[in-house]
Amino acid sequence: MSAFTDAKSASPQLKQAAIGVVIGFDNLGHAVAIAALVFAGEMIAGATIGMVIFLMAAILGTLSLNTRRSFAAPMFSNVQNVPIAVLIPVIFLIHTMDLNDSEKILNVLLLLGLTAILTGIAMIAISAFDLGRMIRLIPFAVTTGYLAASGTLLIRSSFYVVCEGQSCSLLTVFSNAGSTGLVPLLTILFAMLLWCATRVSKHFGTVSWVALSIALFYLILFVLDIDPAEARNAGLLPDNMSVARDVLDFTASFSALKFDIILENWPIVAAAILLGIFGAMLNVTGAEIAVGRDVDTRQETFRAGAVNLVTGCFGSSVSYVSPGNTTIASMIGAKGRYAPFAACVVMGGGALFANEIYTSVPRFVSAGLLMFLGISIVNKWLLSEWRRQRFSDWLLSFAIVAVALTLKMPTAIVLGIVTASLIFAVNYGRLSVIRSSATLGRVRSAVDRGPLQTEFLDQHGHEIAVVSLQGFLFFGSVMQLSAHIRNLFKQSPPVNTVVLDFRGVSRIDGAAIVALHKLELLASERSAQVILCELNPHVLQEIERRSVLEGSRTFKVYDTCDIALETLEDDLLRRLPLAASEETAKSALIEITGDQDIAERFLTIMDRELVPEGTLLLKEGEKSGDVFIIDQGSLSVYIKDRDGKSIRVLKQKPGAIVGEIASYSGKGRTANVVADSETVVYRFAENRIRDVQETEPVLAAIWHKGMASALAKKLQRTNQILGDQTL
């Protein structure tokens, strides 16, 4: 490959084409190795057919990547090793069935094609419904474990090629007598040399080393005067395809297709589909890094799914973007569409001469290439992750690999899913389900009361706790809620009412329902009550379905937390003596000034006004420094949302001060204030305030001090609320 990077004198188009030729030959070697794996032994007659199908799938995938409008950089696709490695046990089972060679080949193509079609359907569904985010929830350690396991299966599958489609192990291949014992030794030796060579000279490339090894093999045959036919008889070269094709019957009937084999081994097929989807999504990320461009994962998943739907109909296995080829092409300067088109031309030529190419590649090269690819996968997703992942995560990946080797891949898939679920539950359970927790002394309803009532609520607000919840309440997170409420009941002084704000809760499960039942028992033992508010329809339906509220004296439900808090405040205020519970403008001024005479003096200066129900007392935007104190009735404060709809944000009762902020800021009113009912107010007009400042500066100072104190208390409460929400 370095020769191409140094070709400065070549035209840009020629250089790009040369890069494509390199990638094309790399895919040729890949197709030979995969075909040798899938159609080993008695099924060798299908190797050429398989090689052609795999190359056609790579061509279609690569063209679909590089002819779309959103083309950003050259990318390449080919048939992937991972799903095939998982399917090897089923392929071996077909190999041992009482069928003729043609029927075996057709059933293997059926297995590969149906797996690709189902994978394509799954990919399209994932893209259409944007389910990729769900797959990304799988912990990285589980995903790397799956991929590393497929690498170990690929290593084991390389011996399947050596043993000509028979089940064998590392020990049995070396126990073979005769010259065939040389093939496994050469396979391992070639894989090791290929591994070392690609590490020493990364820019030379795998395909170059493979081509060099094949050339060296034939050079040795020439020097030793060994005829290729003798090497073929010794098992060093594949059987002649012209002889193998004589036993291939292309007229095998549809009845020869054994769908029941696929149905009986659906866990393995499902595992291949799942790993194909995982591999495709991870490879997209790898390709993004290689080309330095953002790739639309959803669009790419749909493209890969569509390609697999088409190629699966012809018996191809799962294919998707290859980050390896894409990375190599990017490293040696691939730009534009010339390189991928040239690669497709090379692969097309390889398909035309598949028989000659396949029979010329030594068996130990194709098997060794498979072993090398398996080792590379294990190194990338397991060994190299040793220092990158936490030891516990790496140990999980290792466990998945061990289970895949001993108990097969479906069991490893189940282990990964169960472990992923547990990890999700534990990690999500650590997230605080409690967004904020405060007492009524800090959190109030949207009712602005007079100073006396406000002070009383400040003193007794500790009796009521307001707990705002968030997220999904399930068995992993509900325990912290139970513990928190238990502590509220045990603290000194204890809480006798808990308001649970479900505004931020999306769903609850059965464990949360059980926790609510326990909470009811805990509250009833202490004669306390629990208020549930802001429940969305799904949560409310689940609570009602489980009969949590039926016959309960502890639980109460309110549509909004504001209504719940206002009700609780009114209940607390009933403890006040009758005289204190009914505030007026006079009582408010006495509380503000601390002197009854001064309060009466202010009342004589102010204008007493009767405001009919529905009257707009203050208008948003108007500039006025008038201040009002409510004597009787109530007012409501409204603001407009983005759609122009009025929303009530505050209700003001007797003793409440209205308009003081605009009086001191000098800016326009920030909201509309409307009378809820016939209301009596005292207006301290802006010009009257200026007159008092000029004629009675001491009285004016008392007024300003009282207003400053009232504003400071409101600011303090606001800061407390904001502080609680950031906990």
Image (cartoon, rainbow, N blue to C red):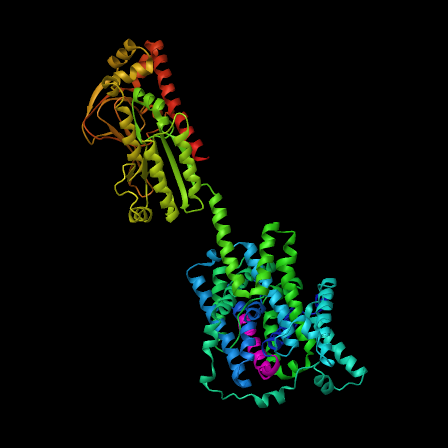
Magenta segment main secondary structure: helix
Quadrant housing residue 534: top left
On screen, residue 346 above or below 285: below
Q: Over which residues does the magenta segment extend?
A: 40-63
On screen, residue 131 above or below 1: above
Quadrant of the snapshot with the N terminus: bottom right
Please tell me which residue is depicted at 33% across the width and 12% down the height of the picture.
594
Q: Is residue 23 magenta?
A: no
Horizontal and vertical percent position of residue 618: 27, 29
Which of these two is toward me, 54 or 235?
235
Q: How many marks overall?
A: 0
Q: Is any atom of residue 609 visible in this view?
A: yes
Please tell me which residue is depicted at 53% across the width and 89% down the height of the picture.
249
Left or right: residue 670 versus residue 275 is left
Extreme residue toward the right, this view: 223
Which of these two is toward me, 456 or 51?
456
Left or right: residue 341 versus residue 497 is right
Quadrant housing residue 346: bottom right
Please tell me which residue is depicted at 57% across the width and 89% down the height of the picture.
247
Horizontal and vertical percent position of residue 705: 37, 16
Q: Is any atom of residue 288 visible in this view?
A: no
Horizontal and vertical percent position of residue 683: 26, 20
Left or right: residue 156 versus residue 107 is right
Q: Is residue 46 magenta?
A: yes
On screen, residue 109 above or below 136: below
Left or right: residue 35 versus residue 124 is right
Please tell me which residue is depicted at 67% across the width and 74% down the height of the picture.
172
Which of these two is toward me, 65 or 32?
32
